Image (cartoon, helix red, strand yellow):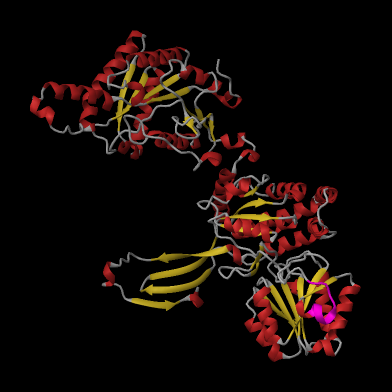
Amino acid sequence: MDAIDPTRGFLKDVKRIVIKVGTAVVTRDDGRLALGRLGALCEQIQALNSQGFEVILVSSGAVGAGRQRLRYRKLINSSFADLQKPQAELDGKACAAVGQNGLMALYDTLFSQLDVTSAQLLVTDNDFRSSEFRKQLTETVDSLLSLKVIPVFNENDSISTRRAPYEDSSDGLYSGPPSDPQSKLIYTYIKEKLENTITFGDKSRLGRGGMTAKVKAAVYASQAGIPVVITSGFAGDNIVKVLRGQRIGTLFHRDAHTWIPSGELNAREMAVAARESSRLLQAMPAEERCKILLAIADALEANEKMILHENEADVATAQDDGYESSLVSRLALKPGKVSSLAKAIRVIAKMEEPIGQVLKRTELSDGFILEKMSSPLGVLLVIFESRPEALVQIASLAIRTGNGLLLKGGKEAKRSNAILHKIITQCIPDTVGKGLIGLVTSREEIPELLKLDDVIDLVIPRGSNELVSQIKSATLIPVLGHADGICHVYVDKSADMEKAKNIVLDAKTDYPAACNAMETLLVHEELLQNGGVNELLIELQTKGVSINGGPKACSLLNLPQAPSFHHEYSSMSCTIEIVDDVHAAIDHIHKHGSAHTDCIVTEDMEAANIFLRLVDSAAVFHNASTRFSDGFRFGLGAEVGISTSRIHARGPVGVEGLLTTRWIARGSGQVVDNDKGVVYTHKDLTQQA
């Protein structure tokens, strides 16, 4: 016996049943009516009718039955010469007209044998566009049901505006074509999980739309509050089994999405859910999105102890597993970090509304206005290592900009990420959906996510050079980020040495694991003679920094050789090299740098301006530590990452970097017509917007 499905308990309270049978069930392979299947169907309906159910039958089959009759009629009326010619397909509407009376006569005969009365109701799709028709039809059906009569609906195909009926036959909805042995029967259709993930096989032997149309109809009905079960019409007792709550066929129910844990969603399902939720988020008033952010800030502070407890467990595990100290440093949430994250979120919430800003407004012609408007990117995939605070920053920026988000953090921060994700998603209202921000927990899902260029709009990797390089080579989705953080500080011959020492120390030691920490110190050769280089080396070594040298520095200062000029230490180590002048420093940065953040320390404004103008990096500073290259310090509230790309966004990426643009045109009936009737004005109205 088939198992009882607990999600189908509502069926015991069902009063009215609509049974839809397709042509493939009503007719045999040769086109004749399937008497055995129709007899079993009528017997099940008679049993339900006697038990007090109100039963409505929606039947196809007139076209199939009529086609068989007309083919026979044409055959006996054709000469041998006629039969040698190519045979034109019979007109479907004529087939419907011929087959309809035979089909209904059979239903009437079968039901009469079971002491049941049936009634015929022929309708077309156009009929239902009339509210008066729908009202009259409802009254008729209610009257028939009160008299225990079985209304039998059929589309009046002989006058229908549709080109052909939509039919199919299967045991239910499969994950792929039923003929594929890898396909599995789906017992409950969950729109949020399965939409855009199912592939359909060939159409049925008689119809055009097949399962695709059937699923659309079932989704439409279920969302309107009418549960639907698609199952095989070939079994003689499937209707009874369905009403017993047995697990056969595919159930469509508007509450089905609440029956499955979000963790069971696969990569595509998560991306689709993020896409749908992002559109609902974008439709919200700006103040409602701000309220979500403020609720998240409050929730983080309220749960600070729990967050720190989970983070401490991650740190302890990482230390036990022998992770490098630089990674452990990035992993740990230092005292006050949760409060600073909450503060940053409130700053983002109070920013000017980013979505729908008119960036440019142009009058194309009289009465025809074109606007260039800011718009969310869509769905972001952010893959990050170690830093759990990145999850909070990225999520808050995504919400502010109306983007959906998929997050994959490093396994070393598993517990920290899980608690932060839970706190954040609990603040997202049901009208948007928790699927707005998905947390990917398995490394194995990353390759699948990187294939989803039809659903995911941007990948932002935050991590090692190896991670970023792997992602760039494995996806067609645009990638925003930086592979390395080879940041330079160049100390010019005219530098104020006190400023220089403070800047160099801060750039290296404030947070050595950060991507904006100094990795290479360049010094003007004249500082060798006046003792400036020694001052800098002493300051660094006193703070515990290990110093390696480039070729010139090694020979002049007796230093160990640096691994390479492109080495990112992410620790209390750095490389020093001697250069001839500002132009040599610029050449070195362009040859060995990563275009992240570079700084000049000098009192010579001409040298400073040359450096600022010519260094081709995302951020270039004069007399300031490279550590200022940060979204929060730039006033962005937070950052989703730092980009060294030369398209879209560069440097710290905040709200603006997660937006694109679209064009909105407001006309009054304009047509191009080869530009004969259009007088283009192209007047800039931006200041008037």
In the picture provided, is 442 more to the left or to the right than 523? left
Check the picture and name the quadrant holding the N terminus: top right
- Residue 678 vertical placement versus 483 (above, below): below
Queried whether the magenta region covers residue 554, the answer comes back as: yes
Res 59 seen here? no
In the picture provided, is 516 more to the left or to the right than 122? right
- Residue 657 vertical placement versus 50 (above, below): below
Q: Position of residue 216 (x, y in %)?
A: 43, 38
The residue depicted at 35 percent of the width and 33 percent of the height is 166
Q: Quadrant of residue 145?
A: top left
Q: Quadrant of residue 90?
A: top left
Q: Residue 270 or 547: which is nearer the viewer? A: 547
Q: Position of residue 412 (x, y in %)?
A: 76, 50
In the picture provided, is 151 more to the left or to the right than 630? left
Q: Quadrant of residue 488?
A: bottom right
In the picture provided, is 75 more to the left or to the right than 371? left
Res 456 seen here? yes
Task: Please report the bounds of the magenta region as a residue range.
Answer: 553-561
The residue depicted at 63 percent of the width and 82 percent of the height is 614
The residue depicted at 56 percent of the width and 68 percent of the height is 648
Q: Residue 604 or 101: which is nearer the viewer? A: 604
Q: Position of residue 335 (x, y in %)?
A: 85, 59
Q: Position of residue 675 (x, y in %)?
A: 29, 71
